Image (tube, rainbow, N blue to C red):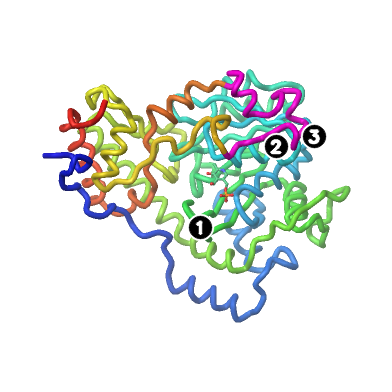
């Protein structure tokens, strides 16, 4: 059987995945209610639907307070602001993530300190976190990556011992739980994104959750231009805020997304488990193992590890080209180590607090070979295969098609360019 990349018939004539995001008549009704109310914006903040959504979203994750925000990048900046991060403070973050996880520190005139990831989960390496802590460290931002969670037991032990706040970047982890505790409720603040690709979406959007009443007030104030309105005026000083308010249209959509979250999480976890079983029969491609302390698994992207020896020594990218040709869109360098990312262009002429540690900027430091992250580099350039969740929600037939495509490539690996 010829591989599709060489002119054979693809295993899947169309990608075997569900259309996403899902919506229903409840969403239609809420959106029309917002439209007809003529109260579309987020001001006065929090607006009623945003307040309703924030509270329900926080409760779903086991936190006391939730604040709606424009997106999941600004959430991280707002979180650092609420924690009173100051110029030159150090913020530890993993290097294998989306740019925003570390760019937030740069935007706050702080200094991101990047560390490598754990080879088992591709989440932040706690040994490296411990080694990177200095007297200037003021926050740690782990990312619950793909379908995994960072080792929150170890991380909280390291952070609590030194009184360093943890901001959980939960952009991939809506609904996940670590030993029964909701993602985002374990550290001081949880940050979520509702951008189009995410597990819950309003096209764009974000939320921060916390159980600390003062932090919640500071977060709400900063999101609302620094105002101190009744209900969030119980702290000293005036933070420099920003308009990062969620709109009522976003909140209306997110209320429905939250109603469906548990069901969607279950479908995704089942799909991920079925795919792991199917791929185990084929060999050569296996999802990363999930820590058993992850008691509810959110599968934003199923991240798998490719073994070239099962495919005649062919490089991961040759395999991916073949897989895409068979009708399965999966990605390799989904993330790259941040100093390699063309969008992570943090220069000291714009953010002078970077100069002491990084010279002209974080890129420049990389050019000198000072920022090397071997685990993340191996994942990005050789090993990782990322599959988006709509594939995991399309039922057993879709899973069988994916497994069939991988099996076909393995059986015909001699056709791949090595
Ligand atoms: C890990 C991570 N953090 C932060 C963000 C930023 O979220 P947003 O796209 O809503 O700004 C994303 C989303 O792309 C992400 O994947």
Label drawn at residue 37: none
| N-terminal-most mark, 2 or 3 | 3
Q: Which residue is drawn at 54% across and 25% down?
A: 116
- Residue 14 in magenta? no
Q: Residue at x 60, y 75 (%)?
A: 34
Does label 1 point to a residue whose CB lies under 8 Å from ligand 1? no
Q: How far apart are marks 1 and 3 (CA)?
A: 33 Å
Q: Which region is colored magenta?
A: 343-371
| N-terminal-most mark, 1 or 3 | 3
Query: Where does residue 135 sit, x and y in percent of width and height?
Result: 76, 22
Q: Residue 55 versus residue 87: which sits nearer the camera? A: 87
Query: Where does residue 320 sit, x and y in percent of width and height?
Result: 31, 37
Residue with the most extreme left position: 1
Above or below, comparing residue 256 to residue 326 in the picture: below
Q: Residue 364 versus residue 173: which sits nearer the camera? A: 364
| N-terminal-most mark, 1 or 2 | 2
Q: Residue 266 vs residue 130: left or right?
A: left
Q: Residue 308 versus residue 163: which sits nearer the camera? A: 308
Q: How far apart are marks 1 and 2 (CA)?
A: 26 Å
Q: Quadrant for residue 85, please give it.
A: top right
Q: Marks 1 and 2: CB-CB under 8 Å? A: no
Mark 2 highlights which residue? Answer: 106
Q: Quadrant for residue 190, please give it.
A: top right
- Residue 347 in magenta? yes
Label drawn at residue 201: 1
Q: Element under label 1?
A: loop
Mark 3 highlights which residue? Answer: 87
Q: Quadrant of the C terminus?
A: top left
Q: How many numbered marks have been drawn onto this rendered protein structure? A: 3
Q: Residue at x 73, y 58 (%)?
A: 243
Is any atom of residue 186 visible in this view?
Answer: no
């Amino acid at each position: 059987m010829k591989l599709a990349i060489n002119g054979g018939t693809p295993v899947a004539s169309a990608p075997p995945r569900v259309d996403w995001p899902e919506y229903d008549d409840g969403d239609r009704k809420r959106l029309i209610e917002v439209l007809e109310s003529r109260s579309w914006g987020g001001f006065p903040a929090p607006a009623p639907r945003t307040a309703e959504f924030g509270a329900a979203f926080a409760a779903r994750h086991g936190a006391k307070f939730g604040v709606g925000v424009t997106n999941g990048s600004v959430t991280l900046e707002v979180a650092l602001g609420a924690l009173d991060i100051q110029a030159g403070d150090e913020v530890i973050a993993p290097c294998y993530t989306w740019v925003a996880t570390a760019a937030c520190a740069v935007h706050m005139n702080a200094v991101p300190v990047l560390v490598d990831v754990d080879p088992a989960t591709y989440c932040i390496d706690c040994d490296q976190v411990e080694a990177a802590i200095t007297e200037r460290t003021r926050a740690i931002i782990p990312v619950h990556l793909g379908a995994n969670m960072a080792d929150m037991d170890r991380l909280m032990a390291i952070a609590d011992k030194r009184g360093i706040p943890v901001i959980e970047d939960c952009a991939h982890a809506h609904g996940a739980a670590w030993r029964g505790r909701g993602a985002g409720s374990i550290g001081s603040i949880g940050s979520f994104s509702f951008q189009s690709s995410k597990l819950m979406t309003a096209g764009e959007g974000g939320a921060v959750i916390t159980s600390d009443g003062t932090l919640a007030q500071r977060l709400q104030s900063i999101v609302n231009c620094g105002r101190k309105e009744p209900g969030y005026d119980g702290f000293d000083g005036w933070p420099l805020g920003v308009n990062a308010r969620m709109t009522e249209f976003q909140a209306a959509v997110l209320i429905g997304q939250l109603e469906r979250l548990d069901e969607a999480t279950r479908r995704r976890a089942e799909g991920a488990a079925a795919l792991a079983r199917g791929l185990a029969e084929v060999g050569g491609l296996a999802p990363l193992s999930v820590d058993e302390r992850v008691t509810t698994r959110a599968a934003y992207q199923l991240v798998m590890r490719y073994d070239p020896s099962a495919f005649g020594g062919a490089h991961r990218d040759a395999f991916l080209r073949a897989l895409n040709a068979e009708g399965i869109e999966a990605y390799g360098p989904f993330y790259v180590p941040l100093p390699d990312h063309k969008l992570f262009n943090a220069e000291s002429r714009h953010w002078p607090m970077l100069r002491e540690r990084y010279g002209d900027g974080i890129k420049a430091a990389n050019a000198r070979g000072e920022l090397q992250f071997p685990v993340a580099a191996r994942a990005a350039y050789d090993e990782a295969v990322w599959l988006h969740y709509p594939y995991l929600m399309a039922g057993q037939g879709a899973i069988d098609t994916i497994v069939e495509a991988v099996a076909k490539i393995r059986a015909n690996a001699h056709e791949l360019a090595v």
